[in-house]
Every structure is written in C-alpha cells, then in structure tokens.
Amino acid sequence: MSHRRGRKGKSTVAQLLEPGMFVRHPLQPDWGLGQVQSVVGDRVTVNFEEAGKVVLDTRVVALDWVPGL
C-alpha cells in the first residue's frame, strides 16, 4: 500500500482503516489478529491477541487488512 498523504493529512492507510476492522502487523506475525480500536490522524490503536493494545503510525507500518471477520 502507498504511504502518501491523502485528504486531511492522513496517510492512505489510515484513511482506509475504521474501528472494528481486523488487521495483522506484517512484521509482527506473532502478535496475532488485531482489531482496530481508533484512528486519529496517522495513528491507529489496535488491540492484538498476543500483544495487547498497540498504537501504530501508519506512515511507518502498512497494516494488512483481514476481510470477512
């Protein structure tokens, strides 16, 4: 995914994520499945099965969306 800035200064990744969506961290597979809790600007708070609550900068990490959950 591209990390370019979109409307309102958010990265493209942050624009696509919404609370309730399920994601995985591509560089931390041991964290397990995560559910997006909030999106504020480029920061996304995700509750991962094994890592708990983590705040991520979507300009640095492109989370993988897990559809159908």
Image: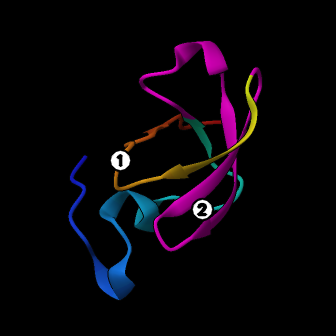
Read off the residue under disc 1: 60
Q: Classify residue 39 as left or right of residue 38.
A: left
Q: Can you give x and y, in whole percent of width and height, for residue 44 in the image? A: 58, 57
Look at 64% across and 21% down and name the residue there: 31
- Residue 29 in the magenta stretch? The answer is yes
Q: Secondary structure at mark 1?
A: loop
Q: Secondary structure at mark 2?
A: loop
* Residue toward you, 39 or 57: 57
| Amino acid at the residue labelled 1 | Val
Q: Which residues are magenta?
A: 24-50
User: What is the residue that sits farthest to the top in this orientation?
Assistant: 30
Q: Which mark is residue 47?
A: none
First reached walking from the N terminus: tag 1 or tag 2: 2
Q: CA distance from mark 1 to mark 2?
A: 18 Å
When asked about the image quadrant of residue 54, the answer is top right
Q: Are marks 1 and 2 in contact (CB under 8 Å)?
A: no
Q: Can you give x and y, in whole percent of width and height, for residue 40 in the image? A: 58, 72
Q: Classify residue 54 as left or right of residue 49.
A: left
Q: Classify residue 48 as left or right of residue 23.
A: right
